[in-house]
Image (tube, rainbow, N blue to C red):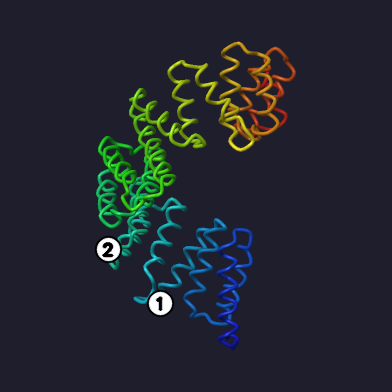
Amino acid sequence: MPVKTHSDQIAKWYLEGMSALQDNRSNRIAILKFEQIIKNNPHFLGAYIGLAAAMYRANDYAKAFQHFSKVLEIGGADAPEIVRVGMAMCSIRMKQYTHAKKCLLRALALQPTFVLAHMAMIVVQLFLRDSAGAIQSVRQLYKLIPDNALAIQKFADYLYIKAVKTGTLTSELIALMKQLIETSSNDPSITAPAAIADRKAYASFQLGRILHHEGSLAEAEECYVAAIKVHGKFVAPKMYLAKLYLATNRDQEARNVLISLDTPLTADRDVILMLTSTNEVAGNAVRAMWYAQRLSLDYATEDPMAWWLLSYVYRKERSQSINFLKKAIVANDGVNKKDWSARANQ
């Protein structure tokens, strides 16, 4: 039987749980607090929602779904619509897209203007490769937030990434995304010069990325350069510009851009990987070796592509090259140690 606990103590645990939930380092504390509440008051809906959120953050999507479902079981019609969206997000993580869609359809039937549900529905439709449905949902979403430029811009960014990942970036969806980006870059409510510049730079980058995907490389280059000109510390357009230069055999220009990114704040695996390969192709063996060493020390880890490249750069040092090749094989498919030598020699 539930333990009788003073309501003030329950409230204290709830506030402590919510506070811990907001701190990524205290997720376990949040779980303990919400479980403590449920033990003492099994009808406290907020505790189930908090526990579901904590389980979701812990990547335990099955348990998160279970706790969201408990809210519907207890609360019935009084359960907030966010619960169904939570169930849908868990289903998406578990790759149960059809079930996720059912949860979202119910949430939208109860609250047709629920922006988060519309966003989640678009994600589900992209995973289900329903481009027509996704386009319709984007239009519905745009009607709900026509004046929220930041939300539109961030969503266009997310939409692009998901559409590319799921292979659903159709010409109609591209046209719609261009409209979203244009809208987000012309927000009359933003008056601060710095904020206007940031918004314009980000919109230019987004448009350039879409043009790049379409194959309109000259126009994409103009957008990347415009974004960099407006916001010189904006890393993303520089990365895409370097990739565009490499794709059009302009290796020296690519290296110049990449070198500008080789700083403690902006250097990452892709930057060092491209600098290694471009210097190797250009015949700058010493420089390629230097970048290769940095790649092996700081970035390669379990990345087979990086180890393959390192093996090639060190091809004149046979033992070192084979060592990197072994690491590439292990990173790629985790073969047993006894197989390394034979496969590396091959």
Q: Nearer the viewer, mark 2 or mark 1?
A: 2
Residue annotated with mark 1: 75
Residue type at mark 1? Gly
The quarter of the rendered structure image containing the N terminus is bottom right
**Left or right: 74 as drawn, with respect to 283:** left
Q: Quadrant of residue 198?
A: top left
The quarter of the rendered structure image containing the C terminus is top right
Residue found farthest to the right: 319
Pick whichever, 281 or 71, lies toward us: 281
Residue 47, placed above or below residue 143? below
> Please, what secondary structure does the residue beneath circle 2 have?
loop
Distance of mark 2 from mark 1, alpha carbons? 20 Å
Q: Position of residue 111 (x, y in %)?
A: 29, 66
Residue 331, placed above or below residue 111? above
> Please, what secondary structure does the residue beneath circle 1 have?
helix
Few, some or many residues within 10 Å of mark 2 (<14, 14–19, 20+): some
| Label annotation for residue 112 | 2
Q: Position of residue 35 (x, y in %)?
A: 58, 73
> Does any portion of residue 124 appear in the rendered image?
no
**Left or right: 323 as drawn, with respect to 281:** right
Q: Residue at x 38, y 48 (%)?
A: 155
Q: Residue at x 57, y 14 (%)?
A: 281
**Left or right: 298 as drawn, with respect to 116:** right
Residue type at mark 2? Pro
Q: Position of residue 191 (x, y in %)?
A: 37, 50
Q: Position of residue 125 (x, y in %)?
A: 33, 48
Q: Residue at x 57, y 81 (%)?
A: 10
